[in-house]
Image (cartoon, rainbow, N blue to C red):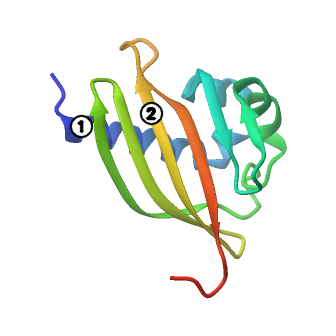
């Protein structure tokens, strides 16, 4: 049986896959990593649903193999309950810095870890 750190590591690995341009460009791969009840509040303040994210992510920045890539750092994670992991981390992307938080849910072994909620908060230039 996996321990809490295994769950956190698996959630981080899934989060990193979602930043991979090849995954972001594929609706099928994106859908496999998002919970059907997924919701995101993006850095813009816009709210995205599962359907909107699966449909639109291939056209968003970071989804092109020859474009800018997300540079994540400072991952921390905690198991909130069995099958529920909260991650926080930071990204740098195309000159922008953001603090991010996501919830990953694992309902069964077949589907594995899926992102249930994500929020990005922009960090103003010059802020620590």
Asked whether 55 or 50 is in front, the reply is 50
Residue 29 appears in view: no
Residue 49 place in picture, x, y as percent: 72, 29
Q: Secondary structure at mark 1?
A: helix
Residue corresponding to mark 1 = 6
What residue is drawn where x is 66% and y is 39%? 40
Residue 121 appears in view: yes
Residue 52: quarter of image:
top right
Marks 1/2: CA–CA distance: 13 Å
Rendered image: mark on residue 114: none
Q: Is residue 45 above or below residue 25?
A: below
First-in-chain label (1 vs 2): 1
The quadrant of the image that shows the N terminus is top left
What residue is drawn where x is 78% and y is 55%? 61
What residue is drawn where x is 75% and y is 40%? 47
Residue 12 place in picture, x, y as percent: 40, 45
Residue 80 place in picture, x, y as percent: 30, 35
Q: Answer whether labels 1 and 2 touch (C-beta < 8 Å).
A: no
- Using a 10 Å C-alpha cutoff, classify the residue at mark 1 as few (fewer than 14 neighbours), some (14 to 19) or many (20 or more): few
Residue 5: quarter of image:
top left
- Using a 10 Å C-alpha cutoff, classify the residue at mark 2 as few (fewer than 14 neighbours), some (14 to 19) or many (20 or more): many
Residue 91 place in picture, x, y as percent: 56, 64
Q: Secondary structure at mark 2?
A: strand
Q: Nearer the viewer, mark 1 or mark 2?
A: 2
Q: Is residue 81 above or below residue 109?
A: below
Q: Is residue 31 left or right of residue 83?
A: right
Q: Is residue 43 above or below residue 83?
A: below
Residue corresponding to mark 2 = 104
Asked whether 28 or 47 is in front, the reply is 47
What residue is drawn where x is 58% and y is 42%? 118
Asked whether 26 or 14 is in front, the reply is 14
């Amino acid at each position: 049986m996996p321990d809490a750190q295994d769950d956190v590591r698996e959630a981080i690995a899934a989060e990193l896959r979602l930043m991979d341009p090849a995954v972001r460009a594929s609706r099928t791969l994106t859908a496999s990593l998002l919970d059907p009840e997924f919701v995101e509040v993006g850095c813009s303040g816009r709210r995205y649903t599962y359907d909107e994210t699966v449909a639109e992510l291939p056209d968003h920045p970071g989804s092109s193999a020859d474009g800018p890539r997300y540079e994540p750092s400072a991952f921390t994670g905690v198991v909130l309950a069995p099958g529920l992991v909260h991650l926080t981390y930071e990204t740098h992307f195309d000159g922008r810095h953001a603090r991010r938080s996501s919830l990953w849910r694992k309902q069964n072994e077949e589907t594995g870890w899926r992102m249930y909620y994500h929020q990005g908060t922009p960090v103003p230039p010059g802020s620590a």
